[in-house]
Image: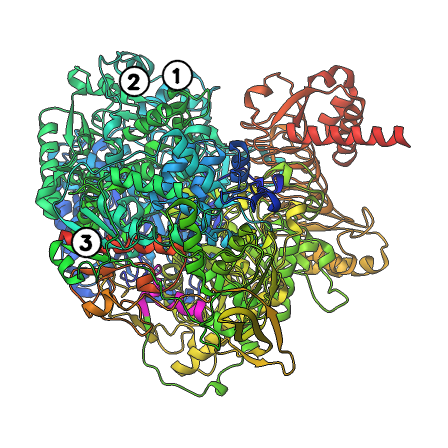
Amino acid sequence: MNQYPPKQGLYDPSMEHDSCGVGFVCNIKGKKSHDIVRDGIRILENLNHRGAVGSDPLSGDGAGVLVQIPDKFFRKECEKINIDLPSEGNYGIGMMFFPRNLDSRNIIQEWTERIVREEGQRFLGWREVPIVPEKIGAIARSGMPVLRQLFIGRGENTPREHFELKLYVIRKRLFNKVEASILREKRYFYFCSLSSKTMVYKGQLMADQVSTFFPDLDDRDFESALAMVHSRYSTNTFPTWALAHPFRMVAHNGEINTLRGNFNWMRAREKHFVSSVFNDEEIQKILPIVVPHVSDSATFDNALEFLVLAGRSLPHALMMMIPEAWSGDKNMEKEKRDFYEYHSFLMEPWDGPASIAFTDGRYIGAVLDRNGLRPSRITITNDDTVIMASETGVLPVPVENIKLKERLHPGRIFLIDTLEGRVIDDKELKKFYASRKPYGEWLNNKSVDLDDLPDPKRFHTPELQTLLQRQKAFGFTLEDLKIVLRPLILNGEEATGSMGNDAPLAVLSQRPQLLYHYFRQLFAQVTNPPIDPIREENVMGENVLLGAEGNLLDETENHARRIRLKRPILTNRELEKIRNLRIPDFKSRTLPMLFDVSRTEKGMEEALENLFAEADCAIQDGCSILILSDRGVDQKRAPIPALLACAGLHHHLVRRQTRTKASIIVETGEAREMHHFAVLIGYGCNAINPYLVGEIIQHQLEQGLLPEGVTHEIAVKNFLKSTRKGLFKIISKMGISTIQSYCGAQIFEAVGLSEAFIDKYFTATVSRIGGIGIKEVAREVLVRHREAYPVEEAPEQNFLDSGGFYHWRKDGEEHQINPYTIAKLHHAVRTNNRQAYREFAEYLNDWKTNLTTIRGLLKFKNKKPVPLEEVEPVSEIVKRFATGAMSYGSISKEAHECMAIAMNRLGGFSNTGEGGEDPGRFEPDPNGDWRRSRIKQVAQGRFGVSIEYLVNADQMQIKMAQGAKPGEGGQLPGHKVSAEIASTRLTTPGVGLISPPPHHDIYSIEDLAQLIHDLKNANKEADVSVKLVSEVGVGTVAAGVAKGKADHLVISGSEGGTGASPQTSIKYAGLPMELGLAETQQVLVMNDLRGRIRIQADGLIRTGRDVVIAAMLGADEFGFATIALVAMGCMMLRKCHLNACSVGIATQDPELRKKFEGKPEHVVNYFTFVAEEVREIMAELGFRSFKEMIGRVDMLEIQDAIDHWKAKGVDLTYVLHKPDVPAHIAISHCEKQEHGLERALDNELIKFCKKSVETRRPVSFDSEIHNVNRTVGTMLSSYITKRCGLKGLPEDTINIHFNGSAGQSFGAFLAHGVTFTLEGDANDYLGKGLSGGKIIVYPPRNAPFVPEENILVGNVLLYGAICGEAYFHGVAGERFCVRNSGACAVIEGVGDHGCEYMTGGRVVILGPTGKNFGAGMSGGIAYVWDKEGDFRSRFNDGMADLFPIEIPEDIAELLQLIRKHYLYTKSPVARRVLDHWDEVLPQFVKVYPVDYRRVLEQQKLQEAENKTNA
Amino acid sequence: MGEVKGFLKYDRQDPKKQSAQERIKHWNEFVTRLLDEEAQAQGARCMDCGVPFCHSGCPLANVIPDWNDLVYQGRWEEAFERLYQTNPFPEFTGRICPALCENACTLGYNYPAVAVKNIEMTIVEKAYEKGWIKPHPPKSRTGRTVAVVGSGPAGLSCADFLNKRGHKVVVYEKNERPGGLLRFGIPDYKLDKNVIDRRLDLMSKEGVVFKTGVTVGKDISLLNLKKQCDAVVLSGGAEQPRNLPVEGRELKGVYFAMEYLAQQNRVNKMKFQGERIDVKGKKVVVIGGGDTGSDCVGTANRQGAARVVQIELLPRPPRERVADNPWPEWALIERTSTSHEEGCERMYAVMTRKFSGENGVLKRLEAVKLEFGPKDPKTGRQEMREIPGSEFVLECDFAFLALGFAGPVRQGMLEESGIALDSKGNVRTDGNYMSSIEGIFSAGDMRRGQSLVVWAINEGLEGGRSVHKYLRK
């Protein structure tokens, strides 16, 4: 049960995340032994680094083990306490947590015994679980429950096969009873397990505390054939015993992104459960199936356990919940596809990155998500042991004993049946389940494709004479037509924009806003990766289903009775097809979303209630499709916001548990852009017909406004294409891959909507500052309606409103950066005019002139002025200032260096951005100026991130997200990659660069901790910073980051700028800085983590007042980006994405760059003004030092004079909450992180190599290595680079031969001159950022298995490698050589997404490849040995072509690489290839990116020309 | 937006003008409109800025980027509609506006600004040619009546606004023809009076009634007028010229600029009886360096003056912006008007001490040179001193005083009605343009003091909006 602190301030326990290490060991034959248990514990101990500790170094986040019931052990133990155990299998054991309060405990025990009897079972007794709590941490102890084991004997009338069900019913009944009670400390009560087969030992322990805490586990008689273990890394540090894994059936490493939707859908289905194993009475007892307020993993476990108990086998249920990516996979067998499709009719996927180990006591196995986003390594031994874990090497096995080394492939299941005593491979297993029932036939017989439906006789056609009025009624502006719709219609692309969002929050706007604008898209950061929906489109699914769902617990032909839609957006014709269906199963009813304007605001609420009632009637009448329609808007009738009607109805039906009986289609004139569609779908809409868009297309066509050749059909096609891309982009930023599971998933945070309104219509959506309710929403509708249908004639009614939402307009939306403020600031900084700055600041600081932000609603209180002279000087304050991350590439060299010089003059920080840095800037200029940026950013593309770059940093910033487009990648088109830019990014000029949405070495929090560790190894003097973007839950992520040992944290607001982003993202993704900052401060303080990390706030900070408020909300430092650009001369043309900046800032055009007039003085002047203003405010408030102001949120209160009709409902209590903690808990930065670098193996290596680095004389030696030795070679490389620069040492100066299993990030940033040979195997991230070194890996020479058929190295190898070489005698996991810039690598097989985003280098693959090879590959060359001739089917041809190897240079290069491979690894594969070269050569294909080819060929031409000229 | 980087591809192009020698031979407009393609290329230079300073700088809030883009795309009719949406009289501003928009154009910061005014002119004249500008009388009438006193740009825009909203509007004009300063103050060569008549004709067809030759305050009292209708708008302009009360002011040959300009306009297109001010072959001094002075220069040259000198009290402005006059503020630089191109000697930092003459007829002007101290950082003013010994004499037969205006004429209507004035002598209004007398509004120069035509048009619209709101109550 939930043991988190209660919700307070901005902290919300539902935002907690966890992630971790997971593993199991088992005996295939089901032979029980104590060794298995012991091995399980050992795995756990070796995964310790994947868990985390918080402020208390002895309190872990949780660890545990699941075993089969050790009968022998309990027989012995029960004898001691006089419990007479029935024979094995005829008794069950409950592992339970109890309240410490004796009365409560006694009562629950009494209830337990009674319920056991009532369910016809025999209560046998209790056992106190022996524990040794002394060694666990104080925090863990503070929340420790009382542990008891419950013994239940099978009742006489219960058949054996029903015993497990009975135990389940007992557990659920007891849970519900306690939950409903008012017992003290009831939150302690929890069942770790209750089963006759398995049991769980777990607690809030560190991995290495489990066996000492539970002496039971050490007993020789404690035997099991399997042990499933889990070490948890949680974002919080609160006592949370119950949330440790394993759960009753699973141990999960990952995150369920669609949880809210899955939860709601499960709830909605419950009422319709008809089970063959549970009778109706029992079903009533066990509801709810999914328990609220628990973690995603626990919810998943709830659902899985139920499905299994209700009759599906464990693998079957998992295939249903975590399906492979079937819809886009052309190569999948039909039977399997049918299976998946059929099951998608029953349940939406539980979507998210996941490696899930599972067992029911007989089967044990693991499943990986469709995109392979978690590592899982498997070893099978000759004596029937299987070891599966997040890492290889966790349980050392003698080499001779190894039969097979494998990894879990994306979407695959690995299963062991301990009863049959064999491993069942994915193919066999899925074939078995796919052929269990004639799924394909059922689909054929019953399901209906929209395309196959008869064309309707009539469908709605445009009514152009009323178009304008209706547009106005739906709030269309000229900008909607020009900026939003035009690119959709003409190019099939979403509108792109630049710079940030400086318009007010919807709730602060003076203008009526659409309800969509109150919702902000959430996105993945740290705890799970966003997906690249373009390069990894193969995992995405757009299809949706209409019609009633069948009983989840059954599978029949009738379950397939659904309408299949290819996409959720419907044309008029398609909608009419559905509406006209006269088939009983697909009866539809259209319900009007309109209300009578004469009834005013109240009328809307009444109409809404009527709508719900009508929907209930329709469902009762057997309708399975509800069409909500706002057609018919006129003088008298106004539209109910479609989102309100849809979400309200969705929740109404979920509450009535009839939601799965009918689909909801929204037929609306209101929705017109991606965000609108996404919010509708996110709140339960199954399909949308945005009819007004079609009418606008027709209108534009008739007016001749569309270019020649664009017909209605083409325009509609473009529009639909763009909705596919746009929706994929939105769902993928949360890491969700199918529209079906996005539906109802509510991946939004509301800003400015009242609690009552949210509870009723958008249940369980986060909305933290209160705001407007249904009355104000109705008022906004009515204002628009009056504009559309004015009482009197007025010429302006013939025109649409100009909007001003994107571009400033006099009569439009307020903007902070507007003509007045730009002019004032330019004037101030250019002439060092303090008065002009004051006017600038006054305008922005006064809510009366500029109410756009949350901080605008605040004012200071408790002022106790001190003299200005006593306040900390400006020169100190400016040291807390930093400019934002802007890459050289997004802005010009001149602008970039101007900013750096200015910040260095001030002693503040500038930031390289994502584009690397010219080494020429590392040293100061002769005049004393320094163009070096102190902050070096490490972003997803890793451009220019070499060991040298890192060594020259004062701060290394890991960019997890960017305010303007969190969860998205970026792209620098080839024409912008000049020679200069290419050289700082360490790539090829002219070749386009893609920055992927996720960091491919950060799919979860423990991965981030790993990257922090890597960077710290690369430069231990520099701080590691993590940049996050504000959204609900960012505080808990920040806590995880602090526990992951980051020194610095940036909380960025969604206002932040960009060189180019979709307008949707600029406007609707992410939350304001204030919310994220305040939440972060609160959660870190609650966790006692605040002192060890510095916080920088960033998000359109413009004035000293902004700085002071941010400090009070918890910031130590402050980032400025947009405004710093304005100080350098930016005029907000918002044309950065077009390379057309007329003041030479955001452009690479040499002509325009000449126009750059910014001077470091301007920037210095600006920051000085800001600091002066800060100082003045400090004096006024009574702060002498800045530090004492940090976290002083008690100095703030809400402005009382605000009478804005919307803003007055805003409540900032949560933002201004100060956690109640003892005085010694820090509220600002004050201590250092403990990085543990002294334990690194590199300390030893450096000792051995020191002399060699000085003398350059070669050295070579051996070293043992284990998976716990992480980031080996990086500190050594840092040592070398500091002395020798990027060129490092001569080749092979340092030779180290390792034996064993290397931990993660082996050879990361390895410097030139270092050669690592590893005999053994390696984990993920080997060779990341390789900076010239050489890595050779092969299996032990005495290994009995065939290396090229076994997995040797993990996922994401050579990520962002710059140069160097790598040779692998064996196979790698997913994403081999992702974003390789220049390294050469040879390998004998790779998983999915090989060479993704590669921009340079050479790769030879002498074996099989996985799916989606070469996606986003813009440079470099891969040579693939396509033995079977089927490579093309797994190749992504988006950016590269395939060629035979014919050119002599290619042949020579390939041959050379294979020869080297043989030389280093002695690979028989290489030998065979070399021996049969002429035969084999034709089987090779060359993967040659189009861009790269063009550039190389141009270069060749150029060279030839030069030659002839010479 | 226009074309990406269009401003790098196309230079700014201003329309062709007849040569100075040719154009001073007549009184007609001498600027040729841009050709369609030329205007389109000029539209291509516009960047559709995220923060369009042109739009911000325009008193009418013309959404310039929108119509620049439409012109670039060749969507002329839409461009016209978008322009017409904010500006009721683009044919006036397209000719005579000093183009605050171009001054504020972001491109103008470091490139030649987008040729907004020329594009505007091209749009509106095309619209007339194509017949897109047609009378649109209101579909229904509210039954309310409004009297507008004064038919300058403010009065006209106010009348137009209210008429289109269904109110019955009667415009009272003291002169023989409506148009106010547009008709009488601005020389024909800058604004052909047919352009005004074309507009007046349109307005008449839409139902606006013009009563000319009626002086409110004389022929009918303001209060009586108010009784006849539901609201009155005073838009009589700021016609009280600023005088130069020095010795010899009374001499024959010393005139207010407006006397001179109005007379010439009457001579050109209307009947004029009375004594001509004809400078043919004479020496002329124009006192005052502003636009009105410049108009006097052009008029004098066209009449065939022997020599024209323009003197200005303030020092010569810089060629380019100085640091404390940064973009997008109005650039305080020396501007050369087309009239200056036609021949004129300009003198700065000169103060007129006295006029002298013979037989009551002006013969010369005595002046002294000035020097200016540094700018007071607080007031922005510079101390002014006569340079000893710099006195000089200018021979002249005519002197025109173009020293600006000192608010509305108080005698007559204003005094008689007892309406409240503000400290500057303009009609005092509340936030809704209403004067101290219920139902009587004021707009334009009469309310805000001497200003630009574009401001006057805006005043008329805003005043109209207030009246409309008042009438709907």
The answer to whether dots 2 and 3 both sit on one chain is no
SS for callout 1: helix
Residue B246, compared with residue A240, is above or below; it is below
Q: Quadrant of residue B412?
A: bottom left
Q: Is residue A1509 left or right of residue A358?
A: right
Res B268 seen here = yes
The answer to the question of whether label 1 and label 3 lie on touching residues, with beta carbons closer than 8 A, is no
The chosen color scheme is: rainbow
Amino acid type at image mark 1: Glu
Q: Is residue B428 left or right of residue B406?
A: left
Q: Disc 1 marks which residue?
A: A335
Q: Is residue A853 left or right of residue A980?
A: left
- Report x, y in % for residue A1342: 69, 35
Badge nearest the viewer, 2 or 3: 3
**In the rendered structure, which segment of residues is drawn in magenta?**
A839-858
- Report x, y in % for residue A681: 30, 36
Disc ID at residue B469: 3
